[in-house]
Amino acid sequence: MSASTVRIAAIQATPVILDAEATVSKALHLLAEAAGDGVKLAVFPETFIPLYPSGVWAHAAARFGGFDEMWERLWANSVDVPGPHIDHFIEACAEHSIYCVLGVNERESARPGSLYNTMVLLGPEGLLWKHRKLMPTMHERLTSPPWPPSSSARTASPSRARTTSSAEAPPSNPLPPPPDALSLNVGF
């Protein structure tokens, strides 16, 4: 069996904060650019759409000053999986023959109330898997519940590639089983 080289891109970009439409547009441009450079797997940051709930605003939000308005904007700009925003990425993956790992704040519009720190693998075939973060850390707990349903790690094998993923906390954070859900391995 001969080995081949596969280009992988870690896309380090800033989202258009709390603007899902603009962030999706920006991400699709970056995905097309990566594909044009010969990339076969592009990986975006954790909760890229619409933002990572950083400690910069979490301190003030924990004191509940303006938190309701911030929460409403975060909810309105979060992503249903599956849903229309994800469909745009699937179409781009098919058009450019590329795979994409994308971090989103996931909502369930049919069950409003919680947001999930979710990672999805998308490709020309569609939505290959999604993984919800098992244990939010510190300020992430303002927006995401611990151990949400369907939280186990997912494995996919697109086009002879085996990809396993997890977005988890540092070792100081308690984690539920299975222990093999704590790795990110990408191999082609």
Image: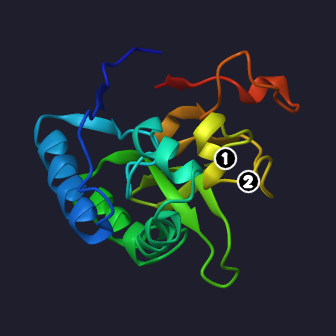
Tell me the residue at 54%/71% (across/down). 82
Secondary element type, mark 1: helix
Looking at the image, which residue sits at the far bottom?
A: 110
Residue 178: quarter of image: top right
Report the residue marked by disc 1. Answer: 141
Q: Please name which of the two marks, 2 or 1, marks the residue nearer to the observer.
A: 1
Residue 132: tell me if it is visible.
Answer: no
- Expressed as whole percent of the image width and height from the top left, the position of residue 6 reads 32, 25
Tell me: residue 118, above or below residue 20.
Answer: above
Tell me: residue 173, above or below residue 94.
Answer: above
Tell me the residue at 77%/47% (across/down). 146
Tell me the residue at 73%/16% (across/down). 172
Secondary element type, mark 2: loop
Q: Nearer the viewer, residue 142 or 95?
A: 142
The alpha-carbon separation of the residues under discs 2 and 1 comes to 6 Å
Mark 1 residue type: Arg
Tell me the residue at 26%/60% (across/down). 23
- Expressed as whole percent of the image width and height from the top left, the position of residue 12 reads 26, 33
Residue neighbourhood size for the residue with mark 2, other residues' Cα within 10 Å, grouped as few (<14), some (14–19), many (≥20): some
State the count of labels.
Answer: 2
Residue neighbourhood size for the residue with mark 1, other residues' Cα within 10 Å, grouped as few (<14), some (14–19), many (≥20): some
Q: Is residue 1 left or right of residue 91?
A: right
Residues under numbered marks 2 and 1 in contact, where contact means CB atoms less than 8 Å apart: yes
Mark 2 residue type: Pro
Report the residue marked by disc 2. Answer: 145
Which mark is on residue 186?
none
Tell me: residue 95, above or below residue 1.
Answer: below
